[in-house]
Image (tube, grey):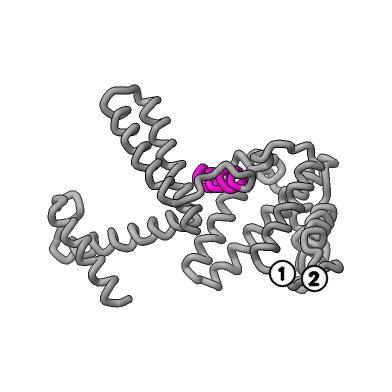
Amino acid sequence: MPDTPLIHDQTAGIERLLEIMRRLRDPETGCPWDIEQDFGTIAPYTIEEAYEVADAIERADWAELEGELGDLLLQTVYHTQMGTEAGHFTFQSVVRAISDKMVARHPHVFGEESRDKSADQQTRDWEAIKAAERAGKAQKGALDGVAVGLPALLRAYKLQKRAARVGFDWPQTAQVLDKIVEEAGELAQARDHLSPDKIEEEFGDLLFVVTNLGRHLGVEPEAALRRTNAKFTRRFAFVEAALAARGKRPEDSDLAEMDALWDAAKAAERDTA
């Protein structure tokens, strides 16, 4: 199949990308790899691209973010092309659905409701609208609709938020801290006396309560852990560089030396803060 002018028209916008994906998936003239893919095989790439967007934002790398947003957009185009082929939906129907949803969820912007509301009131209104949408989808339970495929830490956070909206929550942060102490004790007992399966269960319980503490403190745990991961990576790189200056690698060192260098990394960060 010869290329259409649209394929090479750099001013064509989204229609160009849609045509490129149609060509890639063409069963006779497309790319063999792209033709073989389905929703299940592409989904992991979609998740990966979303994380790469978040990573670029975390690093404030705006040039990189432009490219990563394009990669994420390609995932949407990929899924909608497969949806079109299967007769499930099209790119235009997906755009129409999200546009309708945004208009319906913002009556204070696109309707006649007053914009003179607090952020808390707007949040409550948003949740009421989403609850009505879930009811229309036969999602009756308070936890229905929290995606199973989310990262476990993020899903725990969202499950707890949903439960809190219907009153299933500790009223004070101190009670959550007490629960953390309790769960840590149960994990210690499991470590000494129980099976690996039970240890895993108790460890999960502890993580779940720590996630709840983050919610009570107004901290999104996934973001907090990403920040700590970045800090650990940065400080360990300092340790490796300092060891290299001494003609060593981490495996040539010991914990006492590396711990001292770790403290030096922390002090250097404080000095530059």
Q: Residues within 10 Å of mark 2 (few under 14, many from 20)?
A: few
Read off the residue under disc 1. 117
Identified by mark 2, the residue type is Ser
Q: How many marks?
A: 2
- In the image: residue 21, left or right of residue 218: right
Along the viewing direction, whichever of 42 and 157 lies nearer the viewer: 157
Asked if the residue under mark 2 is in contact with the one under mark 1, i.e. CB atoms within 8 Å, the reply is yes
- In the image: residue 66, left or right of residue 242: right
- In the image: residue 5, left or right of residue 176: right
Tell me residue 47's x, y (percent). Answer: 59, 49
Q: Residue furthest front?
A: 171
- In the image: residue 114, left or right of residue 165: right
Residue 156 located within the stretch drawn in magenta: yes
Tell me residue 132's x, y (percent). Answer: 78, 47
**Helix, strand or loop at disc 1?**
loop
Query: Is residue 181 among what the camera can see?
Result: yes
Q: Which mark is residue 108?
A: none
Residue appearing at x 79%, y 67% in the figure: 108
Tell me residue 223's x, y (percent). Answer: 48, 57
Q: Which mark is residue 114?
A: 2
Residue appearing at x 67%, y 60% in the figure: 123
202 w.r.t. 227: above or below: above
208 w.r.t. 52: above or below: above
- Which residues fall within the magenta stretch? 152-164
**Helix, strand or loop at disc 2?**
loop
- Real-space CA distance between mark 1 and mark 2, rounded to the nearest whole angstrom: 7 Å
Along the viewing direction, whichever of 228 and 70 lies nearer the viewer: 228
Residue appearing at x 57%, y 41% in the figure: 168
Along the viewing direction, whichever of 145 and 175 lies nearer the viewer: 175
